[in-house]
Image: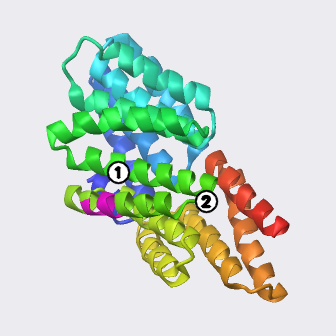
Amino acid sequence: MGNIYKETGEWEKALEYYRKVRELKKSIGDVMGDSGLLNVISCTNFLFGNYHQAIKDYEESLKIAKITDDAILLSCILSTGGKCYLDICDFKKALQCEQKRLHLTQNMMDLKTKGSILAHISNIDLAQGNLSEAEAYLEESLKFRDGLKDKGGIGECFFIFGKLFLEKGKKIKSRVELEKALKYTKDAIQFFEKAYNVFELPQAKLLLARIYLYLGEYEEAKEWMLKSRQRFTELTLFFRIKETEMIEGQIIFAESQNKCDIRERSLELVNSAKQLFNEIGASLLEREAEEIINSMICT
């Protein structure tokens, strides 16, 4: 029931449902259930952009789970922590979470989890600009996921490849790399659709908008930005809607042809997004907004 609430954008109802189930688990002394439900609550807050609460819930969930010494449960919780720490730019803690997962599962023949860990490490390297390392981890992750025919996992790898080649294309000003980013991201969208990855799909569509923007194809960029915004609006993910407005600001700026009033509007959109990201602790998005503002000022 909680998942249905999330997928229809009813986040408070989802959280209320998960809290009730958690209380039930606690009342019967189910430690694993208690910790697992708290991790689900942490994941929900993470998806909603409530990073401060997500990390508090993660830390409490991990503390409870350590009593059980269950490797699979601990790995799931550490995965949540890694994602939270990445988005707030605490790369050291994010990497520690994934390294602990690797240690916990090293004696298990769980190739799906190993593929997940390698993809997450790749994402952490990518956020720090370590493109070669990110690509190596990602290729290894894709081998596992491709072998397992894991549609969602393959989609995640392709999505990260899209981000990777976008960064490469921007760095060396290469259309070839941007075209690779475009192909991987389109493939990611197809896999996310097949796997019904509700929350990843609009993010992939927004990545496509970013790539088209750097390719100078502004109408395509606007189209994919609006598709992404429509879904984020249905999911009532306000900070993600702001993310689309940040990209809209970039598009407007690129099309402005040095018209001051239009450029002011684009800066307003990006600044507004940056302020919200700062308030909720979304440091990775805030960093991107800051980079966009600096590029606008310098142009």
* Closer-to-camera residue (27/194): 194
* In magenta segment, residue 21: no
Q: Residues within 10 Å of mark 2 (few under 14, many from 20)?
A: some
The secondary structure that most of the magenta stretch takes on is helix
Q: Position of residue 252 (x, y in %)?
A: 66, 81
* Numbered circle sitting on residue 191: none
187 in the magenta segment: yes
| Kind of residue indicated by mark 2 | Lys
Please tell me in which quadrant of the rendered image residue 293 appears.
bottom right
Q: Residue at x 35, y 44 (%)?
A: 18
Q: Secondary structure at mark 1?
A: helix
Mark 1 surroundings: few (<14), some (14-19) or many (≥20) residues within 10 A: many
Q: Which residue is labeled 2 in the image? A: 173
| Residue at the spot of label 1 | 158
Q: Quarter of the image containing the C terminus?
A: bottom right
Residue 199 appears in view: no
Residue 84 spot, x, y in % from top left: 53, 38
- Dot placed on the residue nearer the N-terminal end, 2 or 1: 1
**Residue 93 percent location from the top left of the image:** 57, 26
Spatial CA distance of label 2 from label 1 is: 21 Å
User: Seen in the image, is 262 located left or right of residue 255?
Assistant: right
**Secondary structure type for disc 2:** loop
Residue depicted at 22% across the width and 55% down the height? 195
Look at label 1 and name its amino acid. Phe
Q: Marks 2 and 1: which is nearer the front?
A: 2
In terms of depth relative to the viewer, which is nearer, 249 or 273? 249
Front residue of 88/174: it is: 174
What are the residue bounds of the magenta stretch? 186-190
